[in-house]
Image (spheres, grey):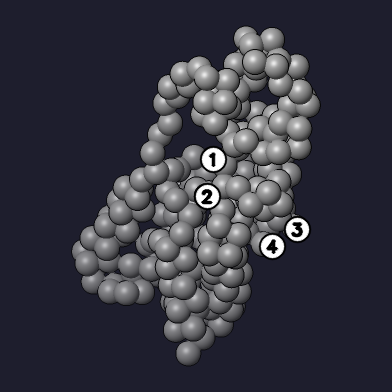
Amino acid sequence: MALENVKVYRKKLCPYGQHAVDLLRKQNIQFEDHLFANTNEEQAFKINHQVQTTPQIFIDGERIGGYTDLAQKLQVAPKATSNKSTSYWPVITVFSVCLLMAIATQTELRGFMGFSLCVLACLKIMDLPAFIKGFVQYDLLAKKQPVYAKVYPLAELLVGLSLLAKQLPIVFGTIALVVGFIGAISIVKSVYIDKLNLNCACVGGNSKVPLGFVSLTENLAMIFMGAIMLL
């Protein structure tokens, strides 16, 4: 099939994007291959074209969709690609263990939140580059000031320790309020306004926890605990 002015917009290491360009080459179709330089460029592309996934293929300026849509247009069977589904299991595990720790130490809500924040911070710090890569995709402050993504796990850890030790409640209560507020606004914009399909970096950058209600609840809980510490 003769196609002209074909453009492929994809990210590096994306299996579906690679399938798309392989298919075009196999069909001897000339195309322009555009690799996103970073996640910010990819997210800007998604918002501009009102799509949730990449790759996206354009023919003569008209968007036809992703790899499967391209295969259908070329009348060939799309290649199956394995893709790990999203899962809430990491979040359930963290909060279940922290709840048991709070019950065992008789520290109630303060202990539960303190343990949870410390464990979540630990998961982020274990692979900080992966966390930063995921976090800057949706956090409004981290997009403008990437250094915020680097200090976020430390701030979360300090707030958790402050809750457990009952020390410096004014300082860390304020930090909890600010961090929770920024996080909540970021998630509302990304998920409910921009309709982006992203993974949450709350339990580490390589998790498959979908960004959404659970992530928003975590930040609202941070705001609540910050208010309790100040009061």
Q: Label 2: which residue?
A: 197
Q: Label 4: which residue?
A: 141
Vertical order, 16 against 107 (above or below)? above
Q: Amino acid at mark 3?
A: Lys
Secondary structure of residue under mark 2: loop
Residue 153 in which image quadrant = bottom right
Residue 63 located left or right of residue 67: right
Residue 82 located left or right of residue 44: left
Secondary structure of residue under mark 3: helix
- Where residue 109 appears, as percent x and y from the top left, is 32, 74
> Are the two marked residues, 4 and 3, in contact with CB atoms closer than 8 angstroms?
yes
Point out the frontmost of discs 1 and 2: 2
Q: Label 1: which residue?
A: 127
Q: Amino acid at mark 1?
A: Asp
User: How many residues crowd mark 3 within 10 Å: few (<14), some (14–19), many (20+)?
Assistant: few
- Where residue 170 appears, as percent x and y from the top left, is 56, 82
